[in-house]
Image (tube, rainbow, N blue to C red):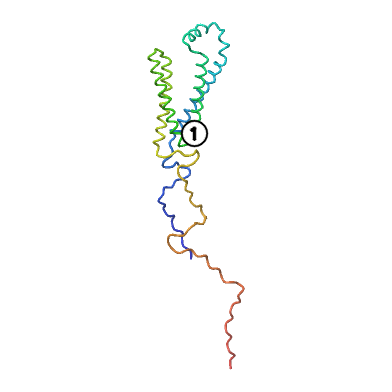
Amino acid sequence: MTYPPPPYPQSPYPQQSPYAPGPYPPSSAGRYAGIALCILGGIALLFGGCTGIVAFMFPSLKGNPEFQQQLAALDSQGISPVVVLWILATVFLLYAVIAILLGILLIRRVNIAVVFAMVFVSLVMILHVLNAAGGLIGGEILAAAVALMVACLHGWILHMLIKQMRAPAPLMPAGMPAHPAYHPPQYGQPMQGYYYSGPQPQPPSQPPSQNIAPQQPPSEPPPQ
């Protein structure tokens, strides 16, 4: 006699299908901020490289009559154009390296990268806001507009980072689900553990061996 298997016990923990999203999926705001930082870092890397090339080729441009008036104005103020170009190239390249590194860490969902990215983006945004204010005071409308646009981009990145910090689920490595998937046993697969009710099912009893000879009925006595 066999007993039917009891129903599966209800677990107090939530279970999910491997094809369905978890109840608290990790936020994608940090990943968007990382992509934006990588794009801005690539642009800064391009600008820094071009500025460095111009600074390297600047001595050969001194003989050009178109730059004579501008160079004379800079020399009268005691400013070396080559030094200014090298400083700009260094600033662009430094920003590019930090932005790309933080962007890659954010895309890979590293927790500590969110804090460092918030500090870095906040400093860059404040610096560009001050540059925009100085450009408006000095009458340089175009430079102020560019600085204000860059400050707005960094403000959006900072907003995404704050949104990531407030997300209910922490950052996790890419490809890892928020909760372990539940895989029910397949049909015919033996259950592990003990049943919660009823005795253990016993294996069916084997039929008697066929080698045993059948018993003969007792013989009747002969008639007298």
The residue drawn where x is 43% and y is 63% is: 198
The image shows a total of numbered marks equal to 1
Q: Name the residue nearer the viewer: 125 or 3.
A: 125
The residue drawn where x is 43% and y is 16% is: 143
Q: Outermost residue toward the front? A: 78
Q: Name the residue nearer the viewer: 51 or 5.
A: 51
> What percent of the width, then of the height, locates residue 81?
51, 13
* Amino acid at pointer 1: Leu
The vertical placement of 190 against 95, above or below, is below
> What percent of the width, then of the height, locates residue 38?
49, 28
The 10 Å Cα crowd at callout 1, few under 14, some 14 to 19, many 20 or more, is some
Q: Outermost residue toward the bottom? A: 224
> What percent of the width, then of the height, locates residue 62?
55, 9
The residue drawn where x is 53% and y is 68% is: 205
Q: Secondary structure at mark 1?
A: helix
Q: Name the residue nearer the viewer: 132 or 39.
A: 132
The residue drawn where x is 46% and y is 62% is: 3
Q: What residue did someone put label 1 on?
A: 105
> What percent of the width, then of the height, locates residue 72?
50, 7
Tell me the quadrant of the picture where the C terminus can be found.
bottom right
Quarter of image, res 124: top left
Q: Name the residue nearer the viewer: 41 or 127.
A: 127
The vertical placement of 21 against 87, above or below, is below
